[in-house]
Image (tube, rainbow, N blue to C red):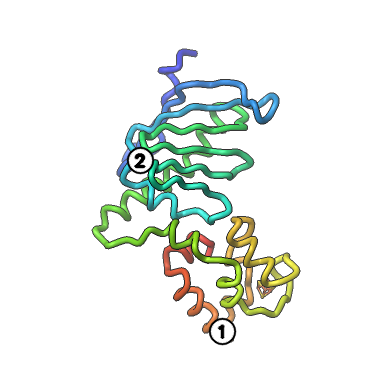
Amino acid sequence: MKMEELKYDVFKDGPLVKSVSITKISPCMAEKGRIKLAMQLDSSLEEVMPIFAGKFPPGKVNYIKHKKILTLNTHNRVITFFPSGMINMMNTKDPEEGIEVITEFMEKINQSYLESESGEDREDLSEKLSKIGPLNIYNCLPQTNCEECGTATCMAFAMQLLSGDNTLDQCKPLFESENKDKIKCLKELLGEELMKTLGG
Ligand code: SF4
């Protein structure tokens, strides 16, 4: 198949990105039998990259601010987004599986664009999140070590939250009425946007 035929119209009415093309398929050096995809979005990510980068927990993301290059460790693979709209995706089964994965991120890119267009004075969320440590999160958790979330302690939960291996909604006691002050504490620490990023 010619490479120019590998264009996928994913979001016909997408406000920023509508389609993605696979420009190169090569063997993945990290995982035998898997492929590496080079892709190109139909739009630059230059403007939306800081907002897009703020949508992932710190343990999953490496964002080089001055180059606007975002690398995610997610879906059992490494995906790198460049400001030009180029994307590299490792450890992929086949082109269709790669497109399925990238669709999720294209949706987030379009959300980021709409947020950037809202005219609100937005903080640099990725930078804000990078300054928050597990102890800050722990101080806003119920601190009962009840294990309902599947981890042995609230501190372990806080660490997993920042590494992206857990989400806030997995702490059920947090959303009970007696812990309203804990939710308030988290909102003050994180703000609404980062609460969403961490699954709250
Ligand atoms: S469910 Fe919440 S309160 Fe219970 S151990 Fe996990 S983080 Fe702590």
Figure quadrant, ligand 1: bottom right
Q: Quadrant of residue 30?
A: top right
Left or right: 23 in relation to 13: right
Q: Is residue 58 above or below residue 32?
A: below
Residue toward you, 89 or 170? 89
Left or right: 11 in relation to 90: left
Residue denoted by label 1: 177
Residue lying furthest front:
66
* Type of amino acid under label 2: Leu
Disc 1 versus disc 2: nearer the observer? 2
All told, the count of numbered labels is 2
Q: Position of residue 45 (x, y in %)?
A: 35, 40
Q: Secondary structure at mark 2?
A: loop
Q: Position of residue 124 (x, y in %)?
A: 38, 58
Q: Is mark 1 within 8 Å of ligand 1?
A: no
Sooner in the amino-acid sequence: mark 1 or mark 2: 2
Q: CA distance from mark 1 to mark 2?
A: 41 Å
Q: Quadrant of residue 182?
A: bottom right
Residue toward you, 81 or 147? 81
Residue lying at 68% horizontally and 29% vertically, measured from the top left? 31
Q: Position of residue 101 (x, y in %)?
A: 53, 39
Which of the labelled discs sits on residue 45, or is there none? 2
Residue lying at 44% horizontally and 62% vertically, measured from the top left? 128
Q: Secondary structure at mark 1?
A: helix
Q: Is residue 95 above or below residue 146?
A: above
Residue lying at 72% horizontally and 76% vertically, measured from the top left? 145
Q: Is residue 119 above or below residue 16?
A: below
Left or right: 195 in relation to 12: right
Which of the labelled discs sits on residue 196, or is there none? none
